[in-house]
Amino acid sequence: MELAEKREYLIKTLLAEQPKYRGMEIPEEAGEQKRLLRSLFNVRMPGKISEDFLKIQDEYLQEVALEKGITDLKDLQSIEEGIYLWQGDITTLRCDAIVNAANSGMTGCYQPCHNCIDNCIHTYAGIRLRNACADIMEKQGYEEPTGQAKITPGFNLPCKYVLHTVGPIVSGTLTTEHEELLASCYRSCLELADKNGVKSIAFCCISTGVFMFPNERAAQIAVQTVREYRNELGNGMEVIFNVWKDIDYEIYRELLR
């Protein structure tokens, strides 16, 4: 089955799950099909699906990852011992674990094609990631507190694991509590990674963007917390600070210089 055929199969299956979508025409143009498939992944609630679907989904997403291009940690140059700065799409990074800036529901972003990291990670990992997160939350029985972390497999991402953490939302003045909670996000991820034998971890810019934490202060806290943790434990875990925006790249480059 060619890539386009796999995409159409996945779209048809997901449309058939929802009575309100049955009869919807599939666009002919590949770009529109990709957008539709991503939207269907995004809005699908957690739940079982056939093994045939999962097999084709996995093949499709792994081919898409290769098309986008995978960056391997071993090909990056450290900016200081054990610490890297890399600008790019975190869903294409091959390392032991990447960090997802999640919301308190922990099952991903449900807004079709939203450009947040939570949406991107869940899209390219596939629907089993949402199911895994839903299982964790069902057992927990309450929303994920800010500053803690959970771990799941990476499924179809190049990484082995995804660490999910809920950062503080800054509405108004930045407070000491906001700063302490953000530091807790980084430390919780590092501790959980250590417990699971993770040797390399890539952090996104937690709480910046729609969570409105000031970029420069967020980066200062991230770098300080990582350095302190590495110095305390001396365990040699490699840390990648992953950024998407130019402004964040410049901030981290200055901090790590």
Image (spheres, helix red, strand yellow):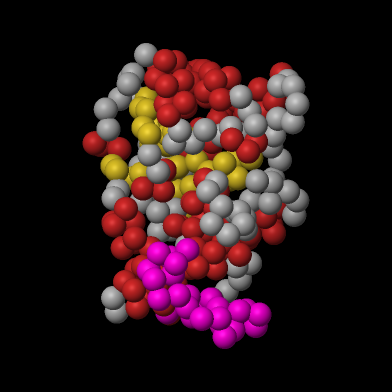
As drawn, which residue projects farthest toward the left?
75
Residue 17 at x, y percent in the picture: 59, 80
Residue 124 at x, y percent in the picture: 44, 57
When asked about the image quadrant of residue 73, the answer is: top left
Q: Which residue is drawn at 65% across and 83% down?
A: 19
Q: Is residue 45 left or right of residue 142?
A: left
Q: In this view, does 235 lie to the left or right of 218?
A: left
Rendered position, 3 above or below 140 = below
Rendered position, 152 above or below 256 = below
Where the N terminus falls, by quadrant?
A: bottom left
Q: Does the magenta stretch include residue 29?
A: yes
Rendered position, 11 above or below 98 = below
Rendered position, 54 above or below 69 = below
Q: Is residue 146 magenta?
A: no
Question: Closer to the camera, 177 or 230?
Answer: 177
Q: Which residue is drawn at 40% across and 54% down?
A: 157
Q: Which residue is drawn at 37% across and 28% down?
A: 85
Magenta stretch: helix, strand or loop mostly: helix
Q: Residue at x 61, y 24 (%)?
A: 214
Question: Closer to the camera, 195 or 84?
Answer: 84
Residue 25 at x, y percent in the picture: 51, 81
Residue 129 visible (yes or no)? yes
When asked about the image quadrant of residue 66, the answer is: bottom left
Residue 23 at x, y percent in the picture: 57, 85
When asked about the image quadrant of residue 201, the answer is: top left
Magenta segment boundaries in residue numbering: 9-35
Where the C terminus falls, by quadrant?
A: top left
